[in-house]
Amino acid sequence: MTNTEERVEDSCPLACRCRLPLSTRTVNHLADLLRRHLKVIRSRWRILPPGKIAVIVLAVLRHDQRLADMAGGNNVSESTVRRWRDELIGLLAAQAPRLDRALKKVAKQGGEVVLIDGTLIRTQRRTGKAGRRNYSTACTSSP
């Protein structure tokens, strides 16, 4: 539901609360990233404070809350929550190491395989060292 007064006949908006197991450190980190970003882009205001935006985005990302549900419960539009989510994902991604550098670091430490998304897919064939399990991996690097 958006912040306009569009309602289905015989319905009323209902907001419910839930407990999110988030650390204060996590919420503060994301809120601080947003505050710094807002200063850089010289944004004068947002409809909600950065801490509240951080909690909404974390609820969407960590607990798969629907955008429309989070929007309706906070009196903002679904597109606003989507924009916040995309903006904060971009800010977090900017802090991540580049893939080529991360792979070089793993190779220096003697690593042989890196699972990028953590997904193991059972396969029929294998190549390489004898005795290796039949799983595909997202990316490999050699020491």
Image: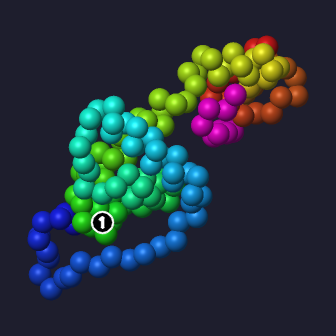
Foreground of the two, 67 or 136: 67
Give the residues in magenta: 114-123
Give the quarter of the image for residue 113: top right
Q: Position of residue 95 (x, y in %)?
A: 52, 31
State yes or no: residue 29 in magenta.
no
Give the quarter of the image for residue 36: top left
Residue 9 visible in rendering: yes
Q: Position of residue 14 (x, y in %)?
A: 29, 79
59 above or below 87? below
Residue 64 visible in rendering: no
Q: Position of residue 135 (x, y in %)?
A: 72, 34
105 vs 68, left or right, is right
Q: Position of residue 117 (x, y in %)?
A: 60, 37
For the residue carrying disc 1, how many other residues have a C-alpha within 10 Å: few (<14), some (14-19), or many (20+)? some
Q: Amino acid at mark 1?
A: Asn
Foreground of the two, 82 or 132: 82
38 vs 58, left or right, is left
53 vs 83, left or right, is right
Q: Which residue is mark 1?
A: 74
Residue, far right: 131
